[in-house]
């Protein structure tokens, strides 16, 4: 079975993530929130690091229940900084709560976060014909505009590179190589 060239074939987490999640259409707000958080944690780190800590993050952040995360106290967040099973970056930990609060505002405005997010691609995934993953840009004009809008709405750690990765992860953009079974 042929996979995208970026997949680390010796890492079962990478294989499972690629085969079962990456680039698949996500319309459930809880999963959209989790993936947004994971992408923000990656800033400056490897995706492998994030995947290795994913289960611990789920436990730390109430399985990404956006309401519970939005209501977390400073004390709860400070306690997470002592947890070696997660990425203990103070700004990213506090950004998780901050982004949950912004996420809830968008849900209220649009009915669902998915409705807001998918409106950026007219509710149809952008299907890129990628021959080699190395030709995929790290950001696009669309990810720059979406990043700017998210920041305007109060989100943090959502630069255009993070947002493009998020768009790929949630299926807004199909950047699987054309030879990949998942394309």
Image: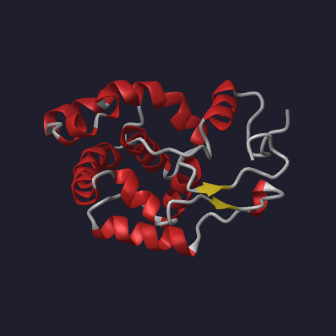
Q: In this orientation, does residue 82 appear?
A: no
> Observer-nearest residue: 148 or 128?
128
> Observer-nearest residue: 50 or 167?
167
Q: Which residue is rendered at x = 58% and y = 42% of the image?
A: 47
Q: Is residue 95 above or below residue 117?
A: above
Return the x and y of residue 46 as percentages of the image width and height. 58, 44
Q: Which residue is rendered at x = 45% and y = 74% of the image?
A: 145
Q: In this orientation, does residue 31 appear?
A: yes
Left or right: residue 134 versus residue 77 is right
Tell me how the rendering is colored.
secondary structure
Return the x and y of residue 27 as percentages of the image width and height. 45, 45
> Observer-nearest residue: 112 or 79?
112
> Observer-nearest residue: 157 or 78?
157
Return the x and y of residue 59 as percentages of the image width and height. 35, 24
Q: Which residue is rendered at x = 31% and y = 45% of the image?
A: 96
Q: Is residue 153 above or below residue 145?
A: above
Marks counted in the figure total 0
Q: Which residue is rendered at x = 62% and y = 46% of the image?
A: 23
Left or right: residue 30 versus residue 109 is right
Return the x and y of residue 177 as percentages of the image width and height. 78, 51
Image quadrant assignment for residue 83: top left
Left or right: residue 3 versus residue 156 is right
The quadrant of the picture occupied by the N terminus is: top right
């Amino acid at each position: 079975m042929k996979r995208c060239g970026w997949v680390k074939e010796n890492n079962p987490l990478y294989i499972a993530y690629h085969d079962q999640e990456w680039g698949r259409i996500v319309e459930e707000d809880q999963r959209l929130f989790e993936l947004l958080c994971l992408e923000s944690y990656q800033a400056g780190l490897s995706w492998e690091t994030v995947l290795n800590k994913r289960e611990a993050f789920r436990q730390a952040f109430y399985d990404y229940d956006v309401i519970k995360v939005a209501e977390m106290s400073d004390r709860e967040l400070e306690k997470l900084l002592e947890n070696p099973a997660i990425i203990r970056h103070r700004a990213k930990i506090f950004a998780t709560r901050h982004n949950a609060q912004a996420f809830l505002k968008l849900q209220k405005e649009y009915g669902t976060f998915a409705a807001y997010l998918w409106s950026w691609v007219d509710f149809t995934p952008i299907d890129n014909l990628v021959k080699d993953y190395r030709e995929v840009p790290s950001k696009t004009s669309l990810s720059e505009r979406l990043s700017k809008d998210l920041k305007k709405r109060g989100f943090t750690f959502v630069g255009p590179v993070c947002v493009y990765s998020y768009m790929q992860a949630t299926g807004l953009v199909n950047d699987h190589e054309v030879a990949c079974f998942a394309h």
